[in-house]
Image: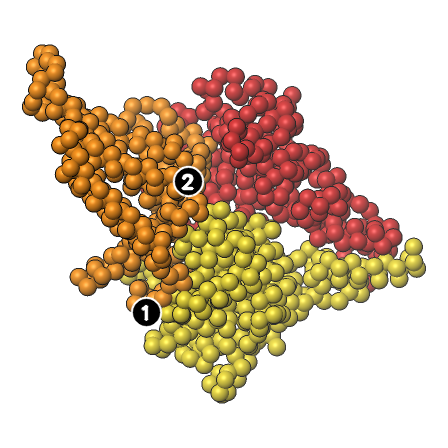
Chain colours: A orange, B red, C yellow
Amino acid sequence: MLGEITIGQYYPGRSVVHRLDPRMKIILTFAYIVMLFLAKSLSALAVGAAFIIAAYAISHVPPKMIFKSMKPVIPIIAFTAILNVFFIEGDVLVSFWKLTITKQGLYTAGLMIIRILFLIAGSSLLTYTTSPIMLTDGIERLMSPLKVIRLPVHELAMMMTIALRFIPTLIEETDKIMSAQKARGADLERGNVLQRAKALIPILIPLFVSAFRRADELALAMECRCYRGGDGRTRMKQLRLSRADLIAAVIVAVFIAGVILVNIFVTPLVAL
Amino acid sequence: MSILKTEDLTFIYSQGTPYAHTAVDHVNIEFEKGELVGIIGHTGSGKSTLIQQFNGLLKPTSGRVFVDGTDIWADPSKIRDVRFKVGLVFQYPEYQLFEETVYKDISFGPKNMGIEGAELDSRIKEAAAFVGLGEELLEKSPFELSGGQKRRVAIAGVLAMRPEILILDEPTAGLDPKGRERILGQIREYHRKTGGLVLLVSHSMEDVANYATKALVVNESKIFMYDDVDKVFAHTAELKQMGLSAPQISDVFELLAARGLPVPTGVYTVERAKRELLRLLGKGGDGDAR
Amino acid sequence: MLIPGGTDPMDNEKTENIISARDVEFAYESGEPTEKPAEKVLKGVSLDIRRGELVAVLGHNGSGKSTLAKHFNCILLPAAGTVWVDGIDTKNGDMLYEIRQTVGMVFQNPDNQIVATIVEEDVAFAPENLGVPPKEIRKRVDEALRDVGMYEHRESAPHQLSGGQKQRVAIAGIIAMRPECIVLDEPTAMLDPRGRTEVMSTIRRLNREHGITVVLITHYMDEAAQCDRVVVMDSGRIILDGAPGEVFSHVEQLKSVGLDVPQVTELTYELKKSGLDLPDGVVSVEACADELEKLLRATSGGN
């Protein structure tokens, strides 16, 4: 049951997007977010939208995955949209009780909704096309300059890797503990919030104890394999920038330029 | 009337998806009260799924499970009660302990049944005695105990519910020979005293040979055979094909029979083998050297 | 032969013994200060492990076998006595990593040794820690995975593997360090029969084909029977040491220390006690059948 939850939402594939260097993908995702916020109008946003739609097409990740990624955010979007629709001053369209809907309000809300939706779509593309290991690798290498300010980059990356490694194992273990306690009559479904929280104790305590024991044993095993922190460590898998990475960077730069140009020249013309 | 019965029981994991897997395939078995059944089968044969059908942890995809003649899913809202009648001890049960004291942990099951007061106290002490836990351990934290002791606490936690049917999934997993012998001895004693049905899932043919009255062989989600232990172990060739082993003695006698020697079948314990061989070699009786 | 005498491990330039222990004593520290000293888990153990040997250390839980094993790669240091690995005293803190590279350790729980999200990255962990160049790591990882028969699973995630497969990955992770010796602390205790067979055949092959010294800590008789030499421990001391057949013939003694003998060993022992002419130390089904066949044919004069 629990084992069917997928973590990291990685959608395996061998497209160009999948094979880009994770460091470049992370940087370009940030660049894409900047692109979206540079867009001052719907027409400018359309450029950003075109970029991400094309990227999805190249990655062969099915469109339904885009909607899957957006689902959890809908409540937030709805809330912010309502704030914008009702509370921005301008040319009034409709008015009832104390609430007014203005043309500007609608436009701003629309702009914001689209921006957020495409932001989610863009960052989801990152996690869909980059496996958790590659992501952690990419983050670790990008952060390594920060070692200068004593940031424990290697240790943080090691923590992330180990966490990712043990998530499926711990999920399996939780399942087993739940079955064992249910076999002794534990009732995890009935009762109010407080009762259900109490019913979780026979699950959480064994899980915590087990997690600590695992950590202990794992640490010992790591030491026996001569682990001594990040100093002097080499890596079997090397990240190397390829031509595809540079081309991707150029494409994103072009699109950013496009957004700016549309802002300046197209938006005043079409007023959208 | 059988105490536990299945009718055309089937269970399919992930039904309707490309990962669908039939773990229990139209199984029909009947267990009588008072049996101590060893359940054997290769890993992945469906043993674990099958036993979780017996206490209602898993709902059958189709087919029915009867305890004491009643379909356990007749009233799904009462399924929890079934788990008090059919006690299930999982593998490595020591990993489920959570209470502050051994006493409190053992009380978890019976408390969920609504038992309290003097009745609760006597059940806890009785269960602890069954597994050989001294009273001085009752007030200790379960986390202070050794692995073997923890396991016995977990088993006591199920025994305290006084289930009519007791199922144990590899209760000796990971234990050394002394530990194995102790736990199996306690299970046998429990079985003798309570006269209920005990199902013991095991990978050890020797353990099944020494402790069980009947053996249930599960293979590829189906039942291969359910019969008295010696009848089951006579099928050494088929058991081997299923990836199971037979007790060493069985193998020896089979080799001897294959070489044309007049040895009896169905011998799988050292005592019986010794008796038979001494008889054949004309030295019948006990082991007095000439 | 039964009690290990010892040549001074410091005698040879390249020592004949990969591991040597002399009069080792050890006690675990109890949490609170008590008046009486903690019970000694090791009470004066002396042992030599020769290069290339396949040794089983047999004992019930609490006999001290795991504690002894942990002295072989400096997880524990002796309270009294000395342990040498490749001629180096384990108390020498400077040589800790050299020792751990020489003697690798595999533990009981298959899950709690795997650190990476995919198999080949986990096997690369040790060489990465040692600063081995990337191309060389790749070579070692591939070789190690092939040696344990897990090359096809190199891109699998740990939770997709069976217990036996996980343990083989753990073994590969150690081999990638190119150790001279592997100590396995009850590696099959949590595995099903198939997993146990996989692990046993893997370590026997590594010992035979690569000459890696193997020290197997176990309480399973049938596993000890597959080794060249069996050392039996009880209450912190070594009580028997020799070839399997010889050690297993001490049936009464083994039973008295909470161990079991294979059914065939017990049967031949019992029959011998009853006056039949049978050898000591029968450990395999075939050998037992052969001996019984001889007797049966002799008595009945054929069919």
Task: Count up the numbered dots.
Answer: 2
Amino acid type at image mark 1: Gly
Residue A36 percent location from the top left of the image: 21, 39
Q: Chain of mark 1?
A: A
Q: Secondary structure at mark 2?
A: loop
In the drawing, what numbered circle is on residue A232? Answer: 1
Instruction: Identify the image quadrant of residue C265.
Output: bottom right
C294 up-or-down from B19: above or below:
below
Asked whether the beta carbons under mark 2 and mark 1 sit within 8 Å of each other, the answer is: no
Q: Nearer the viewer, residue A231 or A195?
A: A231
Amino acid type at image mark 2: His
Q: Residue furthest top?
A: A97
Q: Nearer the viewer, residue A225 or A207?
A: A225
Tag 2: Cα neighbours inside 10 Å, few (<14), some, or many (≥20)?
some
Q: Secondary structure at mark 1?
A: loop
Q: Nearer the viewer, residue C59 or A98?
A: A98
Which numbered disc, 2 or 1, marks the residue closer to the eye?
A: 2
Tell me which residue sits at (30%, 32%) in the image: A70
Tell me which residue sits at (55%, 76%) in the image: C51
First in sequence: mark 2 vs mark 1? 2
Q: Which residue is mark 2?
A: A60
Q: Is B188 left, or right, of A14 in this rendering?
A: right
Tag 1: Cα neighbours inside 10 Å, few (<14), some, or many (≥20)?
few
Quadrant the C terminus of chain A occupies: top left
Q: Is B86 left, or right, of B101 in this rendering?
A: right
- Residue C135 in sight here: yes
The alpha-carbon separation of the residues under discs 2 and 1 comes to: 39 Å
Instruction: Identify the image quadrant of residue A61.
Output: top left
Q: Nearer the viewer, residue C49 or A12?
A: A12
Tell me which residue sits at (22%, 35%) in the image: A45
